[in-house]
Amino acid sequence: MPRSKKSKLRARRQRIRQKRHQSSVEMRSYLELPVREPNGRLQRSSTRSIGMTPEFIQRRKALLGIDPDEDVPLDKLRSQRAGVPLIALADRGLITECQREAGERYGRCVRRYRRLLGLPCGGDGVSIEIEEFDASEVKKIYERYDVARKAITSSYSTPRIGLLALKLIDDLCADDRMIRIASVNIARAGLAALSHVFGVSDAVDQQ
C-alpha cells in the first residue's frame, strides 16, 4: 500500500534534519569545536575520536588562547572540557564558576530562541533542528532572551561597548567560539550581569 503524502513529507523532513545535523557535526569536528547532539547538549567525548596531530594541537591552543610555544599536557588539550570555551576560561581562572554557569544558561537561552525562529544554532551556521513550542513557552523564551540581552548591554558605560560585549558573549556562550583573552575583560561585566538574571549571583567573585 503506497504511503500517504503526509508520511512521505514527514520522512523527507526527517532526512533533511539528519543531513543538517551530520553537516554540523562534520564542520564542528574539522574546526575542533564542541559537537552537540540534535537537542543542543554537548556530545560525550567518548563518542568522538580526536587525533593529536600537530595541526590539532595548534588549533586547540589557539581556541584556548594559549601561546603556541607554551608546553601544555596533551590530556588537557584532548579533554572535551578544553573544547568548551567557557569551561576553558573558568579552568584558567579568567572567569568565575558563577560566571561560567550564567554563560552556559545564557547560551541555552539563545539557542532556544534561535530554534524557535528557525535560525542557525551554533558557530557553523547550520540549523540543527526546529522545535515546536506551546504559547506559554514561546512567551517565556522571548521574555528571558530580551531580559538577558538588556542586562548585558546595560552593564557598560556606553551603548557601543555594550553591543561589543553582546557580540563577544554570544560568540563565547551561544556559538562555542573562544574570544581573545584581552576581550575577556570586556565580557566579564556582562557575564556578571547574567549571573543575576539566571539566579546564580550568590557566588560571584568581584574581579
Image (tube, grey):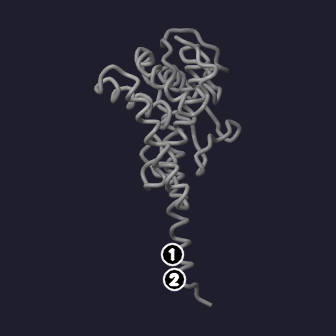
In this rendering, the answer to whether 67 lies above or below 25 is above
Q: Residues within 10 Å of mark 1 (few under 14, many from 20)?
A: few
Q: Residues within 10 Å of mark 2 (few under 14, many from 20)?
A: few
User: Which residue is pictured at 60% across the width and 13% down the height?
Assistant: 72
Tell me where residue 27 appears, x and y as whole percent. 48, 42
Please tell me the numbered disc located at residue 143: none
Tell me where residue 50 appears, x and y as whole percent. 62, 33
User: Which residue is pictured at 61% across the width and 47% down the height?
Assistant: 37
User: Which residue is pictured at 68% across the width and 41% down the height?
Assistant: 47
> Which residue is most to the top?
70
Tell me where residue 90 appears, x and y as whole percent. 59, 19
Residue identifier under label 2: 5
The disc labelled 2 sits on which kind of residue? Answer: Lys
The part of the image, by quadrant, that contains residue 53 is top right
User: Which residue is pictured at 60% across the width and 31% down the height?
Assistant: 199
The part of the image, by quadrant, that contains residue 15 is bottom right
**Callouts 1 and 2 close, C-beta under 8 Å:** yes
How far apart are the two marked residues, 1 and 2, measured between alpha carbons?
A: 6 Å
In this rendering, the answer to whether 30 lies above or below 2 is above
What secondary structure is marked by label 2? helix
Residue identifier under label 1: 9
The disc labelled 1 sits on which kind of residue? Answer: Leu
In this rendering, the answer to whether 2 lies above or below 167 is below
Q: Nearer the viewer, residue 75 or 86?
A: 86
> Which residue is most to the bottom?
1
The part of the image, by quadrant, that contains residue 136 is bottom right
Q: Quadrant of the N terminus?
A: bottom right
What secondary structure is marked by label 1? helix
